[in-house]
Amino acid sequence: KQEVTQIPAALSVPEGENLVLNCSFTDSAIYNLQWFRQDPGKGLTSLLLIQSSQREQTSGRLNASLDKSSGRSTLYIAASQPGDSATYLCAGDNNAGNMLTFGGGTRLMVKP
Amino acid sequence: DTEVTQTPKHLVMGMTNKKSLKCEQHMGHRAMYWYKQKAKKPPELMFVYSYEKLSINESVPSRFSPECPNSSLLNLHLHALQPEDSALYLCASSLGGGSPLHFGNGTRLTVT
């Protein structure tokens, strides 16, 4: 069974910093990996999805990478802003969209 | 604004009540999901519907009963719940085949 871990659990940075969030998974037969953002009391917003055949995806200031051999994914946020403050969750899918396993999330605080 | 709409936003019910959570999407997605999220924990998969048929039940107790009346609607019928069932219930949809999941804002359920 896929297990997903995120480190650190919480992160506080000053505005403008570039930062990296880490996600590790145990089963390299991953179909894809998806990064989400969750604001307090809200649902999840999909940020990026990386297929198993891809190594990275980019959207604006966000870049996500996937290394199946090492069981790792990273989410890079460039020039962080206070509006980036949220919980970031990664989720691995071993069954083409039917079985997302989530990591515990990283709570990010970007201070003005 | 999310394209997956969940109602109600908040629900308080007693252990003897019967209530239903509703989820609606008009993106033409054929896969719909129910997730349960306890405070400060990641979402956990409950049910998956594919083409209006239940394809995955993650050993959820029978006091939770899902229903998919048509391709745009997903219900979760609740009966005889326990206080430990209090959580944020999230609905999601996707095109399937490993496409990104789109989440609603959830229903915050409190069982008294």
Image (cartoon, coloured by chain):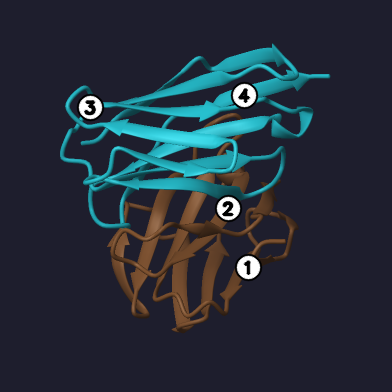
Q: Secondary structure at mark 3?
A: loop
Please indicate whether residue A6 sits to the left or right of residue A82 in the image: left
The three-letter code of the residue at mark 3 reads: Thr
Residue A105 in sight from this viewpoint: no
Q: Are the residues under badges 4 and 2 in a single subunit?
A: no
Residue B47 in sight from this viewpoint: yes
Report crowding for label 2: few under 14, some 14 to 19, many 20 or more residues within 10 A (C-alpha). many
Mark 2 or mark 1: name the one nearer the start of the chain.
Answer: 1
Q: Which chain is brown?
A: B
Image coordinates for residue A104, horizontal then vertical, percent: 47, 28
Which residue is found at the position 69% from the left and 32% from the top? Answer: A84
The three-letter code of the residue at mark 2 reads: Tyr
Mark 3 or mark 4: name the one nearer the start of the chain.
Answer: 3
Which residue is denoted by mark 1 in the rendering?
B3
The alpha-carbon separation of the residues under discs 3 and 4 comes to 22 Å
Report crowding for label 4: few under 14, some 14 to 19, many 20 or more residues within 10 A (C-alpha). many
